[in-house]
Image (cartoon, rainbow, N blue to C red):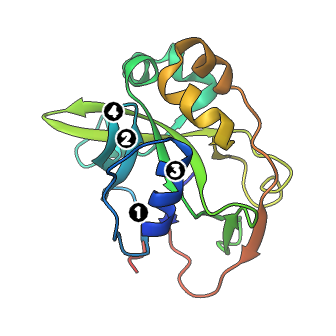
């Protein structure tokens, strides 16, 4: 599960450089993004401002994570996997352990990590969901799921290569740095 991630203007610029995208807006403030908020995501056509979370089956419910392993099997997510793949440029993401302690995961060797996502338009609003997968060794002791993180060399194939994207749904993310944070522990606490 991924219930919060952080990004900044520098993160967006670094991602745009990897994706060879020109004229990408800059100057985004550094902040954490929560489900139900708008944030910039990369698609094959450029940077878009999208709402995090597909509408759920009950009023007010948000589906902000989608299991990568079964996304193609579920009608609700097939369109996004086939025609709405996106990348969320993050500097970190957060997970909580069973004791509700919050951990920040990042890649110290990179200024951006690419979270794989899917998007679709619902009632005229483009929304996205972050794909999750089984945890790697870095996350396993903290949480039973993690975002599907793509290496920089997999970023463009995820966006514009249909056959490569199917294989990438089953990729195991590389190692990450984890640190316990202090302060707020609730998934939906605002900053």
Question: 62 or 8: nearer the eye?
Answer: 8
Label 3: element kind: helix
> Can residue 152 be seen in this snapshot?
yes
Q: Residue 34 occupies which quadrant of the picture?
A: bottom left
Q: Is tag 4's residue or tag 2's residue first in the polypeptide sequence? A: 4
Mark 2 vs mark 1, CA separation in Å: 12 Å
The answer to whether mark 4 and mark 2 are in CB contact below 8 A is no
Rendered view: 78 above or below 191: above
Q: Is tag 2's residue or tag 3's residue first in the polypeptide sequence? A: 3
> Can residue 8 be seen in this snapshot?
no
Mark 4 vs mark 1, CA separation in Å: 24 Å
Q: Residue 17 got which mark?
A: 3
Which residue is under mark 2? 128
- The image shows residue 94 at horizontal and vertical percentages of 60, 65
The answer to whether mark 2 and mark 3 are in CB contact below 8 A is no
Q: Residue 128 occupies which quadrant of the picture?
A: top left
- The image shows residue 35 at horizontal and vertical percentages of 38, 56
Residue at point 53%, 23% (across, down): 71
Which residue is under mark 4? 45
Question: 110 or 129: nearer the eye?
Answer: 110
Which residue is under mark 1? 34
Are there few (<14), some (14-19), or many (20+) residues within 10 Å of tag 1?
Answer: many
Rendered view: 62 above or below 4: above
Label 1: element kind: loop
Residue at point 48%, 67% (across, down): 10
* Disc nearest the viewer among 4 and 1: 4
Label 4: element kind: loop
């Amino acid at each position: 599960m991924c219930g919060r991630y952080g990004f900044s203007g520098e993160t967006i610029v670094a991602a745009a450089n990897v994706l060879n995208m020109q004229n990408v807006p800059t100057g985004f403030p550094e902040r954490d993004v929560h489900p139900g908020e708008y944030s910039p995501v990369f698609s094959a056509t450029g940077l878009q401002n999208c709402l995090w979370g597909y509408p759920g089956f009950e009023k007010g419910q948000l589906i902000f994570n989608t299991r990568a392993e079964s996304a193609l099997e579920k009608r609700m997510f097939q369109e996004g996997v086939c025609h709405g793949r996106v990348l969320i440029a993050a500097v970190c993401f957060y997970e909580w352990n069973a004791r509700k302690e919050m951990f920040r995961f990042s890649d110290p060797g990179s200024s951006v990590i690419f979270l794989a996502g899917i998007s679709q338009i619902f009632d005229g609003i483009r929304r996205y969901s972050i794909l999750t997968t089984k945890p790697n060794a870095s996350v396993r002791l903290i949480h039973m799921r993690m975002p599907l993180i793509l290496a920089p060399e997999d970023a463009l194939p995820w966006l514009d290569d249909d056959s490569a994207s199917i294989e990438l749904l089953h990729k195991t993310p590389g190692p990450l740095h984890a640190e316990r944070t202090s302060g707020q522990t609730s998934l939906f606490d605002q900053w």
